[in-house]
């Protein structure tokens, strides 16, 4: 149990004795994790917006006279990628048409009996499913005609795929850069204490005992770095949400609180894991080198 | 613990053969002077015992451990049997005298209260009680040497290795240090001292092992001479 006290004391010594270096590393870690978080938030919002537009993407199917719209809607609703199906009665379709025509609405009355067919409005989860849905709908005997904006659907599905890839690349790059930064700091800390480590090895300290303070230092840097980055991001994000609401109302940022909390927790976890793993890696490499006999 | 070297050769590079075909046994509780001109291989021999280096040829064992086969996970526990005064002291300049001595036994997981007692005891023994909160840079050469000795004593080692513990010291201080080493030996610890100091070797007579160009030149034990490794 004595060992833990010594280990914590030595960790504190490591952090405070070279506090200039510690603060520098902390700043770098904060910056890198902030950028990592910022790019992730950007990518997540891009995807969010794409999926919102996708959600508004509607495929309209007009049915042949005499077919059962409600039964068909039920069948289509059970398809996994279909988000929602709405049945449009001829009356509703007529109302819409009137609304669209405005002061020429009278013309509609001239039609006499309502000539419009029953229809379905189908929303899908993702734009890439649209073409599949259309193919299936056209094959149904009760469907007369299918109307959708094919080009828009194609474009959206391409943007969505691109956004996913770009965000993955950005996150990977961010993770690699933060790893390198933390790894390097721990290495500098190790070199500045290489003599001490050699002496400790010579007098019979175990690798674990020597490594622990450095690993804790890395964990500390990663944790505090991520925590500060989280704070700055959260404040900045809240500000951005407010500003955009006033200036660019059509840009709607993600405001799902549980989702954002999860995001911040993941960033914190990333910082802690990177700090722990990088320092562990640096220390074990260094000690193996120092311990190798000539 | 006894130290056995059998046919030890250490080659650093083709031109540098630091030790050649050394046969040497140091019994438990013995006191041995390791002498020889500079570059004769004294430090190399001590570094073989601490397993900082491994021999190119030959066998070396300490106690019942074969140092060629020792696993790196066992190494710390092996080294806790040794107390070493390095030729360059290897004191940590950031730490005080007290901390320099303490960290050796702290690393073994000894509880703080016992560390406190033991460290104060050895610091007092080497006469540095009043200097215990100073840092190595604030000490004189002889004082630093005594910190190194106190550190090597702290874990009550079975084997005490000292590399030039009296280098650059005046006669009076050198004698004090040798007497300290003799008292450690009197408590049952095996002691090996590498030294240049012919006066001390003559004044405090003990077994003398002389190296010359990496070869064993003389092993003088109770008046008997071994020349060039032959009995
Ligand atoms: N790590 C090394 N690499 C290459 N050569 C070495 C190494 N260590 C020692 N040597 C060489 O081995 C020889 C013996 O060195 P060693 O340090 O054992 O001498 P020494 O007897 O302790 O000398 P001194 O009395 O000056 O301390 C020297 O010629 C030295 O240059
Ligand atoms: Mg030497």
Image (cartoon, grey):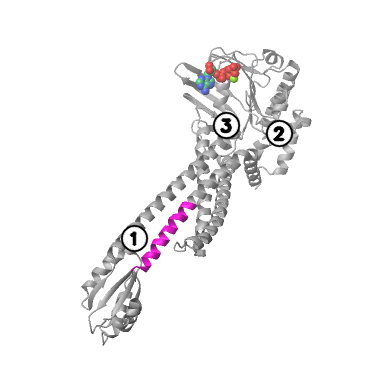
Q: Residue furthest bottom?
A: A113
Q: In which quarter of the image is ligand 1?
A: top right
**Mark 1 belongs to chain:** A
User: Where does label 2 land, which residue?
Assistant: B96
What residue sits 66% from the left and 46% below the top? A5
Residue extending furthest front?
Answer: A103
- Ligand 2 neighbours mark 2 (CB distance < 8 Å): no
Q: Which of A23 and A117 is in front in this view?
A: A117
Please state the chain letter of the residue tagged with numbered disc 3 in the rendered image: B
Residue A205 location (% of width, % of height): 59, 38
Residue mark closest to the camera, 2 vs 1: 1
Q: Does the magenta stretch include residue A151?
A: no
| B25, A60: nearer the viewer | A60
Along the horizontal axis of the image, is B61 left or right of B204? left
Marks 3, 2 in one chain: yes
Is disc 2 in contact with disc 1, using a CB cutoff of under 8 Å?
no
Give, as a single range, the part of the protein colored magenta: A38-57
Circle 1 sits on which residue? A156
Q: In this view, does A134 lie to the left or right of A175?
A: left
Q: How crowded is mark 2: few (under 14 residues within 10 Å), some or many (20 or more)?
A: some
From the image, give the main secondary structure of the stretch colored magenta: helix
| Residue A70 in the image: above or below residue B213 | below
Residue furthest right in the image: B130
Q: Is residue B223 positioned above or below A137 on the image?
A: above
């Amino acid at each position: 149990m004595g060992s833990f006290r010594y280990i914590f004391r030595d960790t504190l010594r490591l952090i405070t004795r070279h506090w200039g270096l510690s603060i520098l590393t902390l700043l770098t870690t904060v910056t890198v994790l902030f950028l990592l978080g910022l790019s992730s938030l950007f990518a997540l919002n891009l995807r969010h917006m794409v999926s919102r537009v996708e959600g508004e993407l509607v495929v309209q199917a007009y049915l042949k006279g005499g077919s059962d719209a409600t039964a068909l809607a039920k069948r289509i609703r059970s398809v996994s990628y279909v988000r929602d199906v709405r049945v449009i009665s001829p009356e509703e379709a007529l109302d819409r048409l009137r609304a669209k025509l405005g002061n020429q609405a009278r013309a509609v009355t001239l039609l006499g009996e309502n000539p419009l067919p029953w229809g379905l409005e189908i929303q899908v989860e993702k734009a890439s499913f649209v073409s599949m849905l259309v193919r299936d709908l056209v094959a149904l005997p009760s469907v007369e005609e299918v109307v959708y904006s094919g080009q828009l659907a194609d474009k959206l599905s391409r943007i969505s795929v691109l956004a996913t890839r770009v965000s993955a690349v950005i996150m990977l790059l961010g993770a690699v850069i933060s790893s390198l930064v933390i790894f390097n700091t721990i290495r500098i800390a190790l070199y500045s204490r290489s003599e001490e480590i050699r002496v400790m090895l010579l007098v019979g300290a175990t690798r674990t005992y020597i490594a622990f303070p450095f690993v804790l230092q890395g964990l500390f840097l990663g944790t505090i770095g991520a925590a500060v980055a989280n704070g700055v991001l959260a404040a900045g994000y809240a500000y951005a949400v407010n500003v955009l609401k006033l200036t660019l109302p059509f840009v709607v940022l993600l405001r799902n609180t549980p989702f954002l909390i999860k995001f911040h927790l993941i960033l914190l976890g990333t910082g802690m894991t990177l700090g722990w793993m990088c320092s562990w890696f640096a220390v074990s490499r260094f000690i193996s080198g120092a311990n190798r006999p000539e | 613990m006894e130290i056995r070297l059998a046919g030890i050769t250490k080659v650093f590079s083709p031109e540098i053969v630091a030790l050649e075909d050394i046969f040497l046994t140091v019994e438990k509780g013995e006191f041995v002077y390791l002498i020889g001109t500079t570059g004769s291989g004294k430090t190399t021999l001590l570094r073989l015992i601490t397993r900082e280096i491994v021999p190119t040829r030959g066998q070396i064992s300490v106690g019942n451990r074969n140092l060629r086969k020792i696993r790196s996970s066992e190494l710390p526990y092996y080294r806790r049997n040794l107390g070493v005064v390095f030729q360059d002291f290897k004191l940590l300049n950031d730490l005080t005298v007290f901390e320099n001595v303490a960290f050796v036994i702290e690393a073994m997981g000894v509880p703080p209260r016992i560390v406190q007692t033991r460290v104060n005891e050895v610091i007092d023994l080497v006469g540095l009680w009043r200097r215990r909160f100073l840092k190595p840079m604030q000490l004189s050469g002889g004082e630093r040497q005594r910190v190194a000795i106190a550190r090597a004593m702290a874990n009550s080692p079975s084997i005490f290795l000292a590399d030039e513990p009296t280098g650059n010291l005046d006669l009076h201080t050198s004698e004090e240090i040798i007497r300290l080493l003799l008292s450690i030996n009197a408590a049952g610890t095996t002691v090996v001292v590498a030294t240049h100091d012919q006066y001390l070797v003559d004044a405090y007579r003990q077994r003398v092992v002389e190296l010359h160009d990496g070869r064993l030149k003389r092993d003088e034990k109770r008046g008997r001479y071994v020349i060039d490794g032959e009995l």
